[in-house]
Image: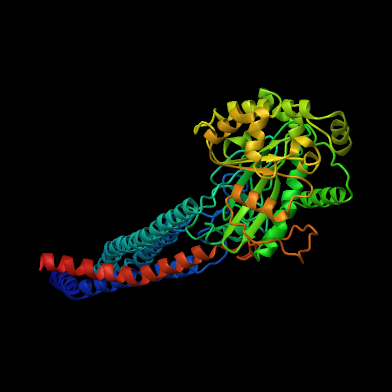
Amino acid sequence: MPIVYGLAALFWVVLLAAEFAVLVPVAIAVALLGGFGLGLYRFFQTAWRTLIVTGVDGPSPVPRPAPGPPDAAYPHYLLFQVWRDAWSLERHTVPWCVTQARWAISTLTDTLLRAPLGLVLFPVWLGLCGGIALGAVPLAVAALAFGVATALMAGAGLAVWSVCVVVLGAVERVWMAYRRILIACPHAGCYRRFALPEYACPNCEERHSRLVPGRLGAFRHVCRCGTRLPTTILLGRFRLGAYCPHCHRRLPGRIGRARVEPLPFVGGPAAGKTTLMFLAVRALRASAAGAHGRAEFVEARDARAYAGAIAELDRGERLAKTGPELPVATMLDLTLPAAHRILYLFDPAGELHTGATHVERLRYLDHGEALLFVIDPFALPELRLALSTDERRLVQEATATSDEDPADTLQRLLAELRSRDDQGRQRRIAVVVTKADVLRRTSAGRGLDGDARGWLEGLGLGNTIRTLERTAGEVRYFASGLDSPPSALADLFGWAAGLPLGAQADPAFDDRPTTDELREPWPIAGRPAEQIPSGHRFGRRALLASLTVLGPVTMILFGLSVYARFR
């Protein structure tokens, strides 16, 4: 019996040696390749399921932006979501591989080490378990390769995105500087100047305060509702509804594409500012039509006020006195073949120019480069003394007159303008003598039409005129009345606004006021709110492609480098 036991022991040892020599390497290779292949299969299965999903909910959810400031828009995919997706792939692959490895080792142990087969199959078990454990090495290399592929894709994409952001931002700044675009608020109590309005989504009305090329997108931002919004004026941002970022009230359409030109009317009470403004608006509208352009009111209330005022003037009635509250600009969107302007016509009550504290509240004076100084000739002390009794009666019956000396009004205005950084320097000042139709019927009105500047100087306003001409780059003088030629008025106001208005009024012009939009509203285009933005979909497809192509290439290069090192 000892001999039998000895032979059996010898046979067992030889069998184990043969298994270690033949079966164990095969078992290790089979387990390693099987585990590696199964891990890759799981990874690509997870990648497909994660990166093909188009809904915001899925294996790797896309957080929906919260409503409210500063911007309810999706960030660029490559900044945040790509790393969430990569982490989701790791989170759904590595734990699964560990679980499967534990299950395989446990199953092999229960199957191959059960007595008495365990005495014979122990080497096979050891080889299979060793192969499963060694499979972690190529899987770790694969994970590193996929990480490198993700980083390469994200880095290349971010480089292209950064170039687009810089170029688009620079082009817009250069374009706005070339067009001398000014953006300001027309609303009472605000009058602030700013660089960028708030823009409202045309679908959900969510406000976007930083709709520029940046971390939320280069060409488009995607609102939380799914609507795509342009990031620059040249891409169509002006077609969105715009709002003041300070008082949050509506701004005129096309703001940012057309320069805002504030034109304040400065003059004492009853100086004729409102009448002058409406006559000028009528002249501008007719002249724009004659030049194959358009001049439309931004607000319906301005159109109604204009229609009512023109009807009263045509009936020979006096316009109602302007209220004492701070003025809201009458906004006129003016489009000519060669130029665009949004005119802010500020017509305050004359009482707001009769005290220094009142003038300080007119903050729209801070950022304009042109103004209209309105002079009531019958408020000039020397002219009043020169009128006869009959002429005074004529003036009282024909028009209301101001008690404010224009020289005093100008001094208060200049004192306020000097608080500006440019010391109140103006490019253009138009000095308008109103009520010229009545003035010509008096002896004092002789010489007014030929030389308004000389006429004013002859009435003791020489110092006032010289002060104005030191304040502005160019000063023009004009005598205005109800009978003033519309072309002359249009030419004066076009000059003040920096517009080439040389055309004659269109005789067939329809003067019925309208508020037609001179821009096509931005279309509601995008995707449902429950789906991810198209940029995220493209980014996920690019990530899947890079993992499919760059991942294996990186693994091959890594294997070749290891082989070359240890050969």
Quadrant in which the N terminus is drawn: bottom left
As drawn, which residue projects farthest toward the left?
567
- Residue 15 lies, in percent from the top left, at 18, 74
Asked which quadrant contains residue 288, the reply is bottom right
Relative horizontal placement of residue 46, taking residue 431 as reference (left or right): left
- Residue 165 lies, in percent from the top left, at 43, 56
Judging depth in this view, the residue of 362 and 18 nearest the camera is 362
- Residue 466 lies, in percent from the top left, at 56, 32
Any part of residue 346 in sight: yes
Judging depth in this view, the residue of 96 and 450 nearest the camera is 450
Quadrant in which the C terminus is drawn: bottom left
Query: How many numbered marks does the figure carry?
Result: 0
Relative horizontal placement of residue 532, taking residue 272 as reference (left or right): left
Judging depth in this view, the residue of 392 and 545 nearest the camera is 392
Q: Residue at x 78, y 57 (%)?
A: 513
Relative horizontal placement of residue 57, taking residue 123 as reference (left or right): right
Q: Residue at x 66, y 23 (%)?
A: 356
- Which color scheme is applied? rainbow
Relative horizontal placement of residue 370, taking residue 156 as reference (left or right): right
Any part of residue 247 in sight: no
- Residue 512 lies, in percent from the top left, at 80, 59
Judging depth in this view, the residue of 195 and 46 nearest the camera is 195
